[in-house]
DNA sequence: CGCAGATCGTACCGATCGGTTCTATCTCTG
DNA sequence: CAGAGATAGAACCGATCGGTACGATCTGCG
């Protein structure tokens, strides 16, 4: 093999290490809240290595955000799937998983919304939009399986609850935010599957 | 009078002019997305004048955010009050007002959440938390007048819908976000005033 | 008119930024 | 062992940052 695999000199392993460490550091400090020099120190890698793998700081940021979006979406989808076949149970599982995230000491809000607010670059905004699209797809699927009269509308309203709960948990009070949002979500789910109570 | 009033040399007028212009520019470009030099050019004021009035850039940012928070909260409260005495109408008016904001070409999401995501300074985060507290107070008041069984819970869920709708409108699709959130809010309001449909 | 002070425009400062380049070292392969 | 490639570490670069200093200009008051 011309390229060593699994060793400390394996480029792919180095890249993965950088991505993983940068994800945590950039989430804690903010995309522009830490320079490349200090970032490399925290990661434990030289600047030359970082630039060889990602070209620019923006390149690292975009790769990190894309990887994080996919990872988080899979995590939420797995939480929903592990709750069984009932759409209500799946929806509840999503918000229970969110509450566990809110209770994590490192929780600092939705990384994608934070990134879009910090970094006024089109590619970053695109990653955020795609991330919300993934969430919307997951929630709309639950709405469809629940027999909602307008699953796309309900999915969008559930997405608002997810992002709203995350924002409230981050900036106001994390305690119970997931549970409160879950209860609201189940109320919407229940109301969307039967005729509207008033007209 | 030792101090001229209303003229271009009136310090209070100058300060108000800076605050108003900086609010728009910093919202468009981001708190750290524009330097003091360019900011002063856009505002039409010299650096010395800006620093005499606000001390530091952070001082300007904090004064701007605090003023914006109060102004926006009053705007939302007025929209609710002008809808009459019915809590449902008041809640609908809030989301109708939000939809008008979402349709504004300069809309770029909740300025307070953006600020907290960008500027990792404790005072900015405090302003954001206070802002969400003002919203919560407004929404909890509506929930109380509607006779909700748990007005604090409902107020918090409505706050999630407000911030969630703003985030979705900013990063996914602004069309109809306010209306969709309004419908969800009215569903929650209706359900919160009567016994829960299942337990 | 003459003074006080608010403002402008510009030059300037030290610090930090993203990014490049260099040499030395290490690891794996042949 | 020899060579190729990956990495570390530090020096270095131009640009930009927030903030300060200074002289010129303007305005309103006495």
Image (cartoon, coloured by chain):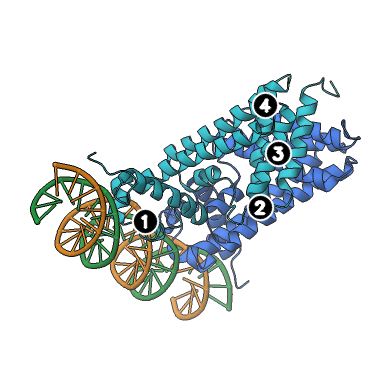
Chain colours: A blue, B cyan, C green, D orange
What separation in Å lies between label 3 and label 2 (alpha carbons)?
21 Å
The reply to whether residue B132 is in sight is yes
The mark nearer the N terminus, 1 or 4, is 1
Find residue B179 and report its horizontal and vertical position in percent.
75, 44
Residue for point 82% across, 22% down: B196
Q: Are marks 4 and 3 on the same chain?
A: no
Label 3 marks a residue whose chain is A
Q: In this picture, is B151 found above or below B175?
A: above
What separation in Å lies between label 1 and label 4 (alpha carbons)?
42 Å
Which residue, given by chain and number where applicable, does mark 4 sit on?
B142
Give me the disc on residue B103. 2
Q: Are marks 3 and 1 on the same chain?
A: no
Left or right: B107 as drawn, with respect to A50? right
Find residue B162 and report its horizontal and vertical position in percent.
66, 39
- Identify the element where label 4 is drawn: helix
Which residue, given by chain and number where applicable, does mark 1 sit on?
B36
Q: Are marks 2 and 1 on the same chain?
A: yes
Which residue, given by chain and number where applicable, does mark 3 sit on?
A161
Badge 3, how many Cα within 10 Å: few under 14, some, many 20+?
A: many
């Amino acid at each position: 093999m011309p390229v060593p695999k699994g060793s400390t000199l394996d480029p792919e392993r180095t890249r993965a290490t950088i991505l993983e460490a940068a994800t945590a550091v950039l989430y804690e400090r903010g995309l522009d809240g830490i320079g490349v020099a200090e970032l490399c120190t925290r990661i434990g890698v030289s600047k030359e290595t970082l630039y060889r793998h990602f070209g620019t700081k923006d390149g690292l940021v975009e790769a990190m955000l894309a990887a994080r979006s996919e990872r988080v979406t899979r995590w939420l989808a797995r939480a929903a799937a592990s709750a069984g076949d009932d759409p209500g149970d799946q929806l509840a599982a999503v918000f229970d998983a969110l509450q566990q995230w809110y209770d994590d000491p490192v929780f600092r809000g939705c990384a994608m919304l934070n990134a879009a607010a910090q970094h006024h670059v089109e590619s970053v905004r695109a990653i955020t939009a795609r991330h919300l699209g993934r969430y919307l797809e997951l929630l709309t699927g639950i709405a469809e399986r629940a027999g909602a009269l307008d699953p796309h509308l309900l999915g969008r309203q559930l997405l608002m609850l997810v992002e709203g709960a995350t924002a409230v948990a981050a900036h106001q009070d994390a305690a119970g935010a997931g549970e409160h949002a879950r209860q609201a979500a189940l109320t919407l789910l229940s109301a969307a599957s039967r005729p509207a109570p008033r007209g």
